[in-house]
DNA sequence: GTACCTCTTGACAACGATGTCATGGCAGGA
DNA sequence: TCCTGCCATGACATCGTTGTCAAGAGGTAC
């Protein structure tokens, strides 16, 4: 595609001529450097204002070797989890005078890599990545070359980098305990494809928690799920001698499918969903959830990235963020 | 803040030396230019691969005057409307080989301007802005200087730019007609502060529609709203001789406040909400809404921006996107 | 053989800023 | 008065790439 080139704009040369100083003095004023007489600074500021001068960051970055830009690669910017995360990243970046490049990898390894390479060609100072399920040895090379990398929500294979995770197992355990405390003795687990790292972790958490409480741990239906598939699973579980009385779902999309599936199946089971969503309190019954905090993840991860940029060379760390059980109504028995 | 400078990376000079060609030939290969013998191209590609060379886009941009970057300024990236919009913008940008810088203005004029200036210092090829309610004459100067500007969701004062809006009035009219078709003759309108452009347009739409149908047009409570303020308004409206039987809300946050306010007031009024939200179909009763399509707005706006970048110099246009009435249950009478 | 054209390649200047270092002027102290 | 140090300023090379144009080699037509 042919693109019209950037518009002609005044340069430091124009400002310098107007103010009667050198280009270097203009640079000192623009960058707030000390060592300029106040009257000179006033004169230069006036010229900048008159001309509508705006520094060319590209030239600055080329000479200085610094971009003050970070890159964020998520799965889908429109997804509530990732948009909350991105919003927080952008806020912290802005506070540190950095701009944010964002891209959606859509779970496609090639696309993730293409976006990341494009960011690196821009010489981003650091990367925040929600990794796809693929080998990330190529990312290790970038990290080794000096570009700090922070992984979000999932670990990556082949690269030792700072990683921020949610306590999936702990969250699931608290949900199971909640249901048990409400009298449930047979709980079903609905989740996504276990090839997804978070789905596998939550499944593990379910099995460990139920076993440790002496309950059945094998009433499991892994996805992908639709309302229809959920309805079928619920009907099958309900017809057993020892019927399932409560369901735990592995993420908020599956929670939605479960809510719709229960309507389809004409069944009213107790429910706890993994991850919160906006209207959980308005549903009937109001849905009890294990809440993550994507904004906190985004903030902390970006804060650590800034520390890396400031010279922190300590070993890569993995931070597991707690979940929170938000008790509403849906965990109680329905009959 | 002190930032470690960008890591040392191989340059075209290194590739050229390894492949035994000139820098210009390396540039031709990297940029896919014709006029390089196939065997030469193979040799250069091998050297690029061996060295892990990645073009320095900053240098390229400085020399060529092109950045292949666009800037998007929304109110809050974590808000569902804006995240869907941003997701669509990023997709279209990617398709056109452009990267996306995003920033959240948070409705603060100074912040919006600061972010926009930072993008311009990066010499973004174009801007997509959800404008705050302030004078945008400064943006007009940028547009005049050649940076295409597309406004989203609201118009801006002081600048003639391409603008994408939702048919607020038409959406409100269809909601009023829907409620009337279900027998309602006294409808209340709940919305935000009318200083917000969209709130004012929707209020106008409500008044025009109710008047044209011979109904009362003055049963209005403008916000900002909380569940408590909504509960108070609903109680007052319900106690009249000619009680309000249905409510139209001006945006999805107010819809949520209305749902919670109805529970607080112990009232069950019919409801149509302006703008859709994820679980509207799962509420009891399922909520009828006037749906916008932020993703379509983002796509079309970015597509037009790309056309501007490609040389389209036709006059600025305003595109009004239709709304869609999503009929569920909440518009029916409750008794 | 000569002239012209095409293909391929490379030399070098330019982009707009910042980093580095030299220079001049002025003030203070001996 | 002379010397030294500090402040302010400016000249110029550098960053890594792309745009521009020149040159050489080979092929074809007259």
Image: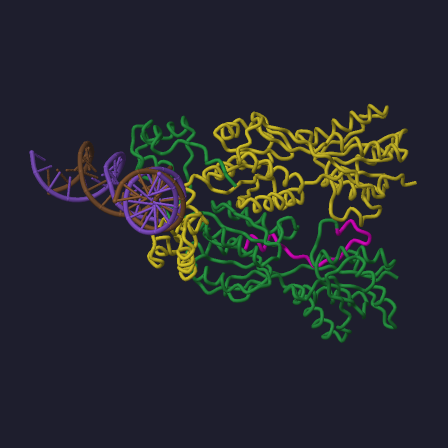
Chain colours: A green, B yellow, C brown, D purple
Task: Examine the rendering and report whether any part of residue A59 can be seen.
Answer: no
Rendered position, A120 above or below D12 = below
Q: Which of B299 and D10 is in front in this view?
A: B299
Q: Nearer the viewer, residue A99 or B293?
A: B293
What residue appears at the point 89 percent right and 35 percent down from the top-left corner?
B182
Residue A34 pos. (x, y %)? 33, 39
Task: Examine the rendering and report whether any part of residue B61 can be seen.
Answer: yes
Q: Nearer the viewer, residue B93 or D1?
A: B93
The quadrant in which residue B21 appears is: bottom left
Q: Classify the position of the C terminus of chain A by image quarter.
A: bottom right
Q: Is residue A39 left or right of residue B151?
A: left
What residue appears at the point 46 percent right and 60 percent down from the top-left corner?
A143
Q: Is residue A114 left or right of residue B257?
A: left
Q: In this view, does B217 lie to the left or right of A325?
A: right
Residue B324 pos. (x, y %)? 76, 38
Q: Nearer the viewer, residue A294 or A335?
A: A294
Asked if residue A283 is among those painted magenta in the image, a careful observer would answer yes
Rendered position, A221 above or below D7 = below
Residue most extreme to the right: B335
Q: What range of the chain is rendered magenta?
A: A280-300
Asked if residue A295 is among those painted magenta in the image, a careful observer would answer yes
For the image, the number of numbered tags is 0
Rendered position, D27 above or below C25 = below
Residue A142 pos. (x, y %)? 46, 59
Residue A182 pos. (x, y %)? 80, 65
Q: In this view, does B128 lie to the left or right of A18?
A: right
């Amino acid at each position: 595609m042919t693109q019209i080139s950037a518009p002609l704009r005044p340069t430091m040369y124009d400002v310098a001529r107007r103010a009667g100083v050198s280009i270097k003095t203009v640079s000192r004023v623009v960058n707030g450097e000390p060592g300029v007489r106040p009257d000179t600074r006033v004169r230069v500021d006036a010229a900048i204002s008159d001309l509508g001068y705006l520094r060319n960051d590209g030239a600055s970055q080329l000479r200085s070797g610094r971009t003050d830009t970070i890159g964020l690669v998520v799965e889908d910017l429109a997804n509530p989890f990732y948009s909350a995360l991105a919003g927080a990243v952008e806020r912290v970046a802005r506070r540190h005078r950095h701009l944010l490049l964002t891209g959606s990898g859509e779970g496609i390894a090639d696309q993730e890599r293409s976006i990341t390479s494009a960011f690196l060609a821009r010489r981003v100072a650091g990367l925040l990545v929600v990794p796809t399920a693929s080998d990330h040895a190529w990312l290790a090379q970038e990290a080794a070359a000096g570009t700090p990398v922070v992984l979000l929500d999932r670990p990556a294979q082949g690269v030792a980098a700072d990683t921020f995770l949610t306590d999936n197992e702990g969250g699931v355990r608290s949900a199971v305990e909640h249901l048990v405390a409400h009298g449930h003795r047979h709980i079903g687990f609905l989740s996504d494809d276990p090839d997804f790292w978070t789905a596998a972790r939550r499944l593990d958490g379910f099995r460990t928690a139920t076993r440790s409480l002496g309950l059945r741990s094998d009433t499991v239906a892994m996805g992908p799920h639709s309302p229809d598939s959920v309805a079928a699973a619920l009907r099958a579980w309900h017809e057993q001698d020892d019927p399932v009385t409560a369901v735990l779902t592995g993420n908020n999309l599956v929670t939605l499918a479960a809510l719709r599936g229960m309507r389809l199946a004409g069944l009213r089971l107790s429910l706890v969903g993994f991850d919160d969503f906006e209207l959980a309190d308005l549903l009937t019954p109001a849905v009890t959830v294990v809440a993550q905090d994507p904004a906190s993840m985004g903030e902390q991860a970006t804060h650590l990235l800034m520390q890396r940029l400031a010279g922190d060379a300590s070993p890569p760390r993995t931070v597991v963020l707690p979940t929170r059980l938000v008790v509403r109504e849906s965990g109680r028995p329905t009959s």
